[in-house]
Amino acid sequence: MKMSIKVSAKPDKCPKCGGKVVEILYGEPTYEAFEASERGEIVLGGCCISIDGEGNLQSPDWQCIKCETQFKQE
Ligand SMILES: [Zn+2]
């Protein structure tokens, strides 16, 4: 299971591994978005947004491209 950390703003780099942190794009990706994900500039989050046991949306905003730790703005 991927780890999710709450942050107040987008981290410059991953606090766990120092990897690059990029934006997660949800929904059907455009060709440009797909290319950007291939270059490691964004992560494709897919069309499914998960919901936790209390009914809260669990859709992180950013992700480390190295260790896949996810970050959500508080
Ligand atoms: Zn990382």
Image: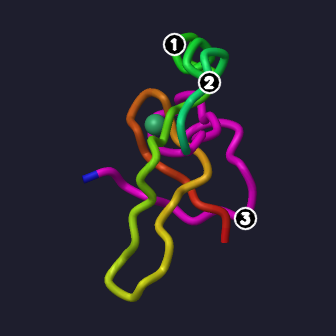
Residue bearing the label numbered 2: 30
Residue bearing the label numbered 3: 8
- Mark in front: 2 vs 1: 2
68 with respect to 15 (left or right): left
Q: Residue at x 45, y 59 (%)?
A: 49
Residue 38: image tag: 1
Magenta stretch: includes residue 8: yes
Q: What x and y, as percent, mark residue 34?
A: 55, 19
Does dot 2 land on a helix, a strand or a loop? loop
Q: What x and y, as percent, mark residue 16?
A: 46, 43
Q: What x and y, as percent, mark residue 27?
A: 55, 43
As shown in the figure, which amino acid type bears the numbered disc 3?
A: Ser
- Mark in front: 2 vs 3: 2
How is the structure coloured here?
Answer: rainbow
Q: Are marks 2 and 3 in contact (CB under 8 Å)?
A: no
Magenta stretch: includes residue 63: no
Q: What x and y, as percent, mark residue 19?
A: 53, 29
Looking at the rendering, which quadrant does residue 17 occupy? top left
56 with respect to 22 (left or right): left
Q: CA–CA distance between discs 1 and 3?
A: 27 Å
Pick the residue in front: 17 or 23.
23
Does dot 3 land on a helix, a strand or a loop? loop
Looking at the rendering, which quadrant does residue 66 occupy? top left
Does dot 1 land on a helix, a strand or a loop? helix
Residue bounds of the magenta highlight: 2-26
